Amino acid sequence: MTSSPPATLSSNRNRSFGTETTIMSCDNDQTDAKPLLSQGSSVSSGSFNQMQRRRVSGKLGKLGKLGRQQSFSRDIGHAAAETYLLTRLTITLLRYLGVGYRWITRLAALGIYAALLMPGFLQVAYYYFFSSQVQRSIVYGDQPRNRLDLYFPKNLDGPKPVVAFVTGGAWIIGYKAWGSLLGQQLAERDIIVACIDYRNFPQGTIGDMVTDASEGISFICNNIAEYGGDPNRIYLMGQSAGAHISACALLDQAIREAKGEESISWSVSQIKAYFGLSGGYNLCKLVDHFNNRGLYRSLFLSIMEGEESLKRFSPGVRIEDPSNRNAVSLLPPVILFHGTADYSIPSFASKDFAAALQRLGAQTELILFDGKTHSDLFLQDPLRGGKDDMFDHLVAGIHAGDEEALAKDAMAPPRRRLVPEVLLRMASYISPF
């Protein structure tokens, strides 16, 4: 199902040698008002003509005001619906985690953490709900939560690189809006971002999540040109649980292609690179760690469809299977980011996956950030503004080979601070992640 581009944008498509270039324009289609009377009309007729124009202008002004009011009402209604969904997800999470002492203290810490970062969250939420650069809830499939959000640069003067992003959330509270800060900041660097939503547990298990992510990637690969994206420059990225889900989707696709399956809707060759941020890729090594952190073994195994399925949903294990060697050779370059002080998913998860890929000849890069936690790279550092090493690495990878874009990046102003430093430091100290 293909959704149309933003209503404020018009597109002219030029096809040449099998590629599609979309030139986006922000001009409104307007026609000049034509005189109602002929040039031979009397002076009194001219006065009547002016009166008619004033009446029409007044009616158009009222209609425009009404349209803006209706649009604002729709945005408020959408915000209320999103708030209800997030509240329901939080209640679901608590129901599955239980209300023991550990989770009561962790929930309290989460509340304080969120309150400290609220100045930044409110600014990002306003951008998400009211910016004309965001198109929310585009349908990409038939299942519940098969929706994605698109973040557009201000200037759509030609096809832009695209990041297909899968958010984290412990496989239970993942939500597409979690990527709004990343979407906003990458859009400022002339990059389109597509944040893919997917079914969470208990609405679905890991197999459903991977299927949803794959369908979202397929939609982007096959339709992004209609939104001003460059289908030849699509990058896949995931964070935390989203890094695991997107890696599973990418490897599954490579395995299907290596086996010569014909019923595929997108190809691994369409992905220029994979970026994994703070992900876990070998679930067999992480079960006990998650159990000690409060994601109890019984719950985790329910999410992952039983202990016998852990290897099947562990990309780090599957690539070691000799029958999948051809699939590994099809993978795009893999760039993994991880903080060395990450206690939610330890950095060994990325180290082991990178080492296994390198042994098998895959093009892989591991970038570790000393002293950074699970939330530093994705939340605190972006909210801090200014220079951000992880963000700089990401943008440099996306713009590699594009001299004009790299020159613009070098001249880009520092990113705006969204939260005072004192609150960020307090949030890092209290963070439950």
Image (tube, helix red, strand yellow):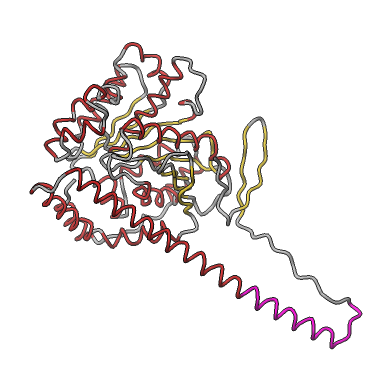
Residue at 62% across / 75% down in the picture? Answer: 61
Count of all numbered marks drawn on residues in the image:
0
Q: Which residue is drawn at the image coordinates 47% and 38% (left, top)?
A: 141
Instruction: Classify 85 as above or below 221.
Output: below
Q: Is residue 26 left or right of residue 113?
A: right
**Residue 192 or 303: which is nearer the viewer?**
303
Percent of width and height locating residue 139: 48, 44
Quarter of the image with the C terminus in it: top left
Main secondary structure of the magenta stretch = helix
- Image: 188 above or below 31: above
Give left or right: position of 427 versus 219.
left
Q: Nearer the viewer, residue 141 or 343?
A: 141
Name the residue nearer the viewer: 180 or 48.
48
Left or right relative to 432: residue 277: right
| The furthest residue to the left | 101
Residue at image x 20%, y 30%?
A: 348
Q: What is the x, y in percent for residue 10?
A: 62, 52
Let me know if residue 42 is in the magenta part: yes
Farthest residue to the bottom: give it.
44
| Magenta residue span | 39-61
Q: Is residue 6 magenta?
A: no
Q: Quadrant of the N terminus?
A: top right
Of residue 367 and residue 137, the one placed in the foreground of this image is: 137
Q: Position of residue 227 (x, y in %)?
A: 55, 45
Furthest residue toward top:
322
Tell me residue 400's x, y (percent). 45, 36
Q: Is residue 49 left or right of residue 265?
A: right
